[in-house]
Image (tube, rainbow, N blue to C red):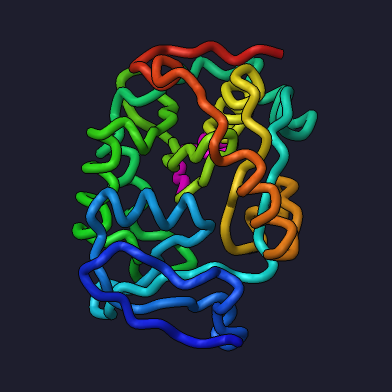
Amino acid sequence: MNSLSYLNQSIGFPPPEQALTDPNGLLAIGGDLRPDRLAQAYYQGIFPWFNAKDPILWWSPDPRAVFTPSHPFGSKSLIKCLKKSAWRFTINQAFLDVVAGCAGPRNTQDGTWISAEIQMAYYELHLQGKAHSIEVWDGEQLVGGLYGIPVGGVFCGESMFHRQTNASKAAFAILNQHLVKHNFQLIDAQVMNPHLVSLGAKALPRSEFLTLLHQYRDRTTSASIWNKQEVFIEF
């Protein structure tokens, strides 16, 4: 039965299958953004998404936008661009700056859902080793990046940004390379949009996504793969 749940202080979510069909995927309202609740949400295939003046809203849409990690990633034109580029790539060297970049104004949006509350919540996850960033640098200038949360063999992508053309695609290429190297099986991109389609995302029925999540979420990966580091793109 599809229904909307109201969360209290205890950490617990209803089954994702109970999410509403209109609006698509809205599952629960309320609660808080403390790290253990966020971690439990992603473990169950649920994520928060709400405007700054709204209560906390929790979602599990149907279908789900996903990628299968692949390397090399991207079109021939992107690979050609990266071969010519002087960009540097790092992991977890500027997490807060990446999240702030993702929260910046977009040409197609009046505001952002990544409020100061959201930024600090994910920074707390980062400090616990549960949220990570990919950075793209032009010299000492941060020109693109992305962040997300690994859950076993699944990487749950949250947001990406660019300040130079193709910089967010470059960050995603580095992410793919890193995930393939460490045997991740799925990238969760949450809600399909034209940009994700252009990157090659596939729409997966929620039931199939949850089956894959349950299959991969308890895999163990060394925490050291997310140590602060410089990485080099491989072709």
Residue 231 appears left or right of 188: left
**Residue 17 occupies quadrant:** bottom right
Residue drawn 59% across and 34% down? Answer: 153
Q: Measured along the vertical axis of the image, is residue 129 above or below residue 28?
A: above
Residue 93 among magenta residues:
no
Q: Residue 165: in sight, yes or no?
A: no
Residue 161 among magenta residues:
yes
Q: Measured along the vertical axis of the image, is residue 138 above or below residue 64?
A: above
Residue drawn 35% across and 36% down? Answer: 130
Residue drawn 28% across and 80% down? Answer: 54
Quarter of the rendering occupied by the N terminus: bottom right
Quarter of the rendering occupied by the C terminus: top right
Query: How far across and down, in percent of the image, does residue 51 sit?
Result: 32, 73
Q: Which of 121 and 146 is in front in this view?
A: 121
**Residue 219 occupies quadrant:** top right
User: What's drawn in magenta, residue-wise?
Assistant: 159-169
Q: Measured along the vertical axis of the image, is residue 116 above or below residue 54?
A: above
Residue 212 appears left or right of 14: right
Query: How far across and down, in percent of the image, does residue 225 sit?
Result: 45, 17
Q: Which of 4 and 124 is in front in this view?
A: 4
Q: Residue 55: in sight, yes or no?
A: yes
Residue 200 appears left or right of 195: right
Query: How far across and down, in percent of the image, does residue 46 sit?
Result: 48, 61
